[in-house]
């Protein structure tokens, strides 16, 4: 009954008795009845506002469990029997409303209003697309609050509304005493003031599946490849141990048959693939059940049926944002526009749009479905009572082309006020004014059909062997190489310790260089002098070595930088870049002489002595390969440079830190300003990136020596 209705009935009854007693009071009573009738009928807006509770009460009158048709992607209407079976286990009359979470600002107030309209005592429960949100017991004894607490705390956030209600009903059925004890235990374990634990999630998301696929790819290539590399290395490593050298046959009993190692690697790969498939067997990311075709079309059919009777349809399950007067004025504007020249039908649907509905929250997709169901051309307007957005699509109406709707003012399309009704009545009136002034076109406009994604795609997880699985294969191979390098290094150290009594001699050409990243000027002068003097002594002590062309070219280039006087290295006349060049050339010359001493084949000397220096820091010594490395912390630009073994491993394992190995030199000039990367200085030094011969040529050109 509408507000004021009972009071009207009571006044009418009293007035009737008064008329029978004394007819002289008829004029006064008539006036009183007129005011009572006016009081009852006047608040049209309030009467419209009761539509939501009255509509829901009517639904519960037919069935104590009502599942909305607005959440088919999360809670299809076909799940109503499951909610009904759970409600029967509570032991008290239970009325369940499954509605969008935004259906009411105050769930308890909505349940109270529905109870008043229905007039039946029982446990009233409100469920949204996630969980049980509110519950109130009217005239029955039920631990509603404790059951809410248990369902909220004990279940993970992704348990789903059905499981949440089942847990709620289970606690209600236990009675007040057990429910209170269970609620207290849940608060102590899961609340922030207690242990603060979170129940483990039931489902994984797309990001988790990407991580699973990536990890599977890494393991699928990394582990078998590591087995192959380590197996071969360990076999050679064991043969070099002292025990193997003393007793060559000692390792034969444990030697694997030929082909065993690849077989083990293959079986490992199969086991990893099979184990990952069984472990990561999730196929969905939500507890939502797949909706039927009827679930997906139910709300559209309801709206179409309403628009056939009235061009303005307001969702009865939502709070009313248009009063009777606003709806009447909007109908008049629509009728007037339909009769105007070039005008046509306008259909207004005041319904909420959510990602859980049949259109996945897409206004154009919803309008397209309604247009298909209604089968009439015109302007289809979708006004959302939740956030106040207004969207419109024109089908076959020359007066209103869709390109003009793109220019709909933002003040009309979006609500920038804080009004509860989002000023939808006024803004829909402004929309009609905009439509009336829209430019004419020669041909009708039929937009492309906009379809919502299939519900099966909403929560379906990608296959395990897809997406990031493929990059994982590549990363796994690189990871295997890195781990192999580390383990090989450890085994090499262990082998060295075990062979201490009979150490293998180091090659005479192995040089252990000092190579600071930011050397001081003092260090450069001291090191350049000592390195150049060492090279000079080797020529002095062994005059026949002067015939070694490569070593002599290095010595000649270094001496050109100091004008033939080693003592000049102690003065400020030699720049830091020249000092670095002297160090590099001196070390390269000594390496060439060392290689000459170890080889009788003079033709191999140039191959064994190093030509390329490390491009990040020439003081690191010879480069082992070229590699793309970042030379600066800013940006992601990389350069292909020759790098030494250490820089290469750093570029592979920690590419984000390799730029810290780049050598910088002290500034030049009186003030000795900020340090400068060595390749940016003036003079011959930057040519070292192209090789020692190129550096020597640059030095000779700069000193005019041919």
Image (tube, rainbow, N blue to C red):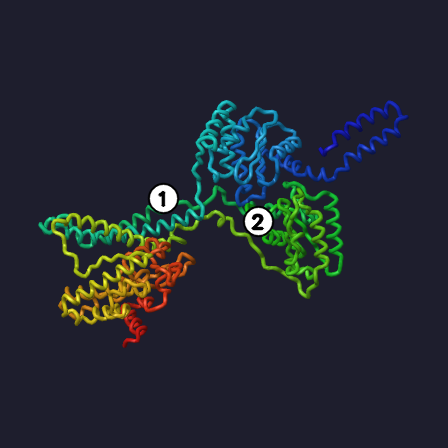
Do the CB atoms of the residues marked 2 and 1 lie less than 8 Å apart?
no
Q: Is residue 544 left or right of residue 303?
A: left
Q: Position of residue 387 (x, y in %)?
A: 62, 46
Q: Is residue 418 left or right of residue 499?
A: right
Q: Is residue 57 left or right of residue 324?
A: left
Residue placed farthest to the bottom in the image?
A: 706
- In this view of the protein, can residue 646 be seen by the observer? yes
> Crowding at label 2, few (<14), some or many (≥20) Cα neighbours within 10 Å?
some
- Residue 279 marker: 1
First-in-chain label (2 vs 1): 1
- Residue 611 marker: none
Which image quadrant for residue 9?
A: top right
**Residue labelled with disc 2:** 361
> Crowding at label 1, few (<14), some or many (≥20) Cα neighbours within 10 Å?
few
In the displayed structure, 299 sits above or below 195; it is below
Q: Mark 2 falls on what kind of element? A: loop
Q: Position of residue 585 (x, y in %)?
A: 25, 66
In whole angstroms, how far apart are the C-alphas of marks 2 and 1? 35 Å
In the displayed structure, 342 sits above or below 154; it is below
Q: Position of residue 210 (x, y in %)?
A: 41, 50
User: Image quadrant for the N terminus?
Assistant: top right
Q: Mark 1 falls on what kind of element? A: helix
User: Image quadrant for the C terminus?
Assistant: bottom left
Residue placed farthest to the right in the image?
A: 24
Which image quadrant for residue 395?
A: bottom right
Residue appearing at x 25%, y 62% in the figure: 529
The residue nearer to you, when weighing 457 against 89, is 457
Residue appearing at x 63%, y 34% in the figure: 110
């Amino acid at each position: 009954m509408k507000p004021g209705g009972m009071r009207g009935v009571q006044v009418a009854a009293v007035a009737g008795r008064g008329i029978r007693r004394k007819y002289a009071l008829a004029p006064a009573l008539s006036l009183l009845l007129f005011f009572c009738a006016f009081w009852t009928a006047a608040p049209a807006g309030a009467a419209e506002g009761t539509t939501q509770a009255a509509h829901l009460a009517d639904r519960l009158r037919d069935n104590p469990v009502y599942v909305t048709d607005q959440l088919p992607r999360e809670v299809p209407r076909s799940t109503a029997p499951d909610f009904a079976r759970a409600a029967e286990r509570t032991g008290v009359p239970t009325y369940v409303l499954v509605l969008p979470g935004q259906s009411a600002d105050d769930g308890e107030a909505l349940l109270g209003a529905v109870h008043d309209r229905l007039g039946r005592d029982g446990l009233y429960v409100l469920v949204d697309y996630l969980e049980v949100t509110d519950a109130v017991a009217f005239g029955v004894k039920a631990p509603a609050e404790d059951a809410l607490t248990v369902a909220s705390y004990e279940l993970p956030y992704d348990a789903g509304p059905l499981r949440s209600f089942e847990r709620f009903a289970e606690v209600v059925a236990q009675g007040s005493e057990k429910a209170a004890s269970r609620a207290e235990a849940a608060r102590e374990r899961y609340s922030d003031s207690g242990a603060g634990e979170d129940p483990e999630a039931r489902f994984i998301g797309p990001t988790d599946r990407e991580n699973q696929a990536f990890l599977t790819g890494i393991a699928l290539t990394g582990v078998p490849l590591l087995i192959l590399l380590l197996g071969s290395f360990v076999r050679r490593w064991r043969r070099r141990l002292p025990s193997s050298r003393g007793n060559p046959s000692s390792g034969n009993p444990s030697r694997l048959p030929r082909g065993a190692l690849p077989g083990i690697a293959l079986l490992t790969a199969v086991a990893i693939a099979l184990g990952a498939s069984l472990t990561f067997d999730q196929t969905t990311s939500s507890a939502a059940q797949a909706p039927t075709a009827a679930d997906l079309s139910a709300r559209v059919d309801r709206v179409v049926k309403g628009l056939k009777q009235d061009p303005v349809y307001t969702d009865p399950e939502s709070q009313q944002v248009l009063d009777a007067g606003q709806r009447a004025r909007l109908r008049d504007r629509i009728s007037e526009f339909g009769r105007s020249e070039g005008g046509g039908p306008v259909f207004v649907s005041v319904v909420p749009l959510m990602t859980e509905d049949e259109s996945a929250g897409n206004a154009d997709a919803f309008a397209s479905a309604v247009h298909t169901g209604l089968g009439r051309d015109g302007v289809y307007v979708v006004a959302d009572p939740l956030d106040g957005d207004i969207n419109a699509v024109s089908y076959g109406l020359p007066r209103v082309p869709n390109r003009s709707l793109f220019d709909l003012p933002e003040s009309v399309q979006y609500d920038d006020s804080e009004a509860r009704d989002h000023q939808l009545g006024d803004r829909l009136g402004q929309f009609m004014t905009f439509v009336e002034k829209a430019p004419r076109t020669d041909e009708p406009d039929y937009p492309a059909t906009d379809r919502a994604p299939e519900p099966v795609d909403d929560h379906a997880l990608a296959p395990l062997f897809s997406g990031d699985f493929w990059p994982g294969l590549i990363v796994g191979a690189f990871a295997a190489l890195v781990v192999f390098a580390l383990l090989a290094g450890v085994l090499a150290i262990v082998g060295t310790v075990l062979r201490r009594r009979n150490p293998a001699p180091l090659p005479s050409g192995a040089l252990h260089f000092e190579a600071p990243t930011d050397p001081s000027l003092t260090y450069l002068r001291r090191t350049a002098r000592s390195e150049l003097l060492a090279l000079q002594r080797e020529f002095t002590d062994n005059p026949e070595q002067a015939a070694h062309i490569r070593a002599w070219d290095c010595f000649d280039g270094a001496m050109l930088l100091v004008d033939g006087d080693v003592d000049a290295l102690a003065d400020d006349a030699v720049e830091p870049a020249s000092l670095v060049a002297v160090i590099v050339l001196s070390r390269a010359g000594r390496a060439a002489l060392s290689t000459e001493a170890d080889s009788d084949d003079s033709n191999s000397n140039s191959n064994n002595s190093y030509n390329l220096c490390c491009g990040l820091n020439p003081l690191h010594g010879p480069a082992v390969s070229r590699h793309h490395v970042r030379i600066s912390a800013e940006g992601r630009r990389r350069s292909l440079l020759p790098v030494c073994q250490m820089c290469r491993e750093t570029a592979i394992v920690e590419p984000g830190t390799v730029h810290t190995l780049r050598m910088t030199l002290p500034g030049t000039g009186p003030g000795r300003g900020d340090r400068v990367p060595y390749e940016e200085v003036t003079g011959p030094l930057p040519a070292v990136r192209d090789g020692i011969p190129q550096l020597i040529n640059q030095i000779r050109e700069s000193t005019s020596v041919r």
